[in-house]
Amino acid sequence: MFAPPGTPRGGTVCGMDQPTEREAAELALALVAVATASVDGGADAQAVSEEGLVELVEELGDVPLTERQAVVIETVGAASAALTAGLGAALASEHGRQTEEVLGLAARAVLDQTGEPGGQDRGDSDSAHRTDRSGTAGDSDLPDSTD
C-alpha cells in the first residue's frame, strides 16, 4: 500500500487502515464491475459503477472523502477499467470468446481467492476455475470456443 511521504509504515491513508482480505476483494470486485460496465453497460452504467466504487471506499474509510479524493478514486476506477477491459478483450479475442466472459472469470478468481460464496474453495482440487500464480485466468478457465 502506498503512503504519503512521512506516513509511518502501517499508518492510514485517507483515514483507512490496511484493508482486510474481504475488503480488498470488495474493492477488486468493484473495479471489475467498472470494467464490465465500460464494456457492455454504456456511459450510465459506468457512471453508476464508478459511484459505487467511491461509496465503497468511503464506507471502508474512517473519515468521509473530500470531493477531490472522490474524483481521484473515480479517475483511478476509470483507468483501472480501461486496463482491465483492454486486457480482457485481448484475452477474449485470443480465445474466440466474449470480453464479458473473461471479466466474469476475473470476478470469479477474486471470489476463489477469498473463499467467498460464488467462488470455489481454495482447497478444492476439482475447481473448474483456476488462476495461475500471477492471479490471471489460465487457458483451462476459458470455455472451448467450439461450444
Image: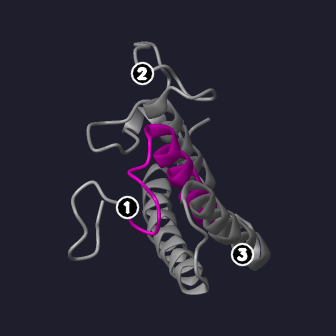
In the rendered structure, which amino acid carries the disc numbered 1?
A: Thr
Return the x and y of residue 73 as percentages of the image width and height: 53, 74
- At which x and y percent is residue 35? 58, 64
Badge 2 or badge 3: first in the primary sequence: 3
Q: Nearer the viewer, mark 2 or mark 1?
A: 1
Real-space Cα separation, disc 2 to disc 3, in angstroms: 33 Å
Quick check: can you spot residue 17? yes
Quarter occupied by the N terminus: bottom left
- Where is residue 83, by image quadrant? bottom left
Residue placed under numbered mark 1 in the picture: 12
Q: Residues within 10 Å of mark 2 (few under 14, many from 20)?
A: some
Q: Position of residue 76 (x, y in %)?
A: 48, 75
Q: Residue at x 53, y 71 (%)?
A: 77
Q: Height in image: 98 above or below 146?
A: below
| Picture layout, residue 41 above or below residue 29 | below
Q: Which residues are magenta?
A: 12-35
Which residue is at 62% across, 68% downward? 54
Residue position for label 2: 122
Q: How many marks?
A: 3
Tell me the residue that label 3 is attached to: 47
Q: Secondary structure at mark 2?
A: loop
* Residue drawn at (22%, 63%) of the image: 8
Left or right: residue 21 compared with residue 2: right
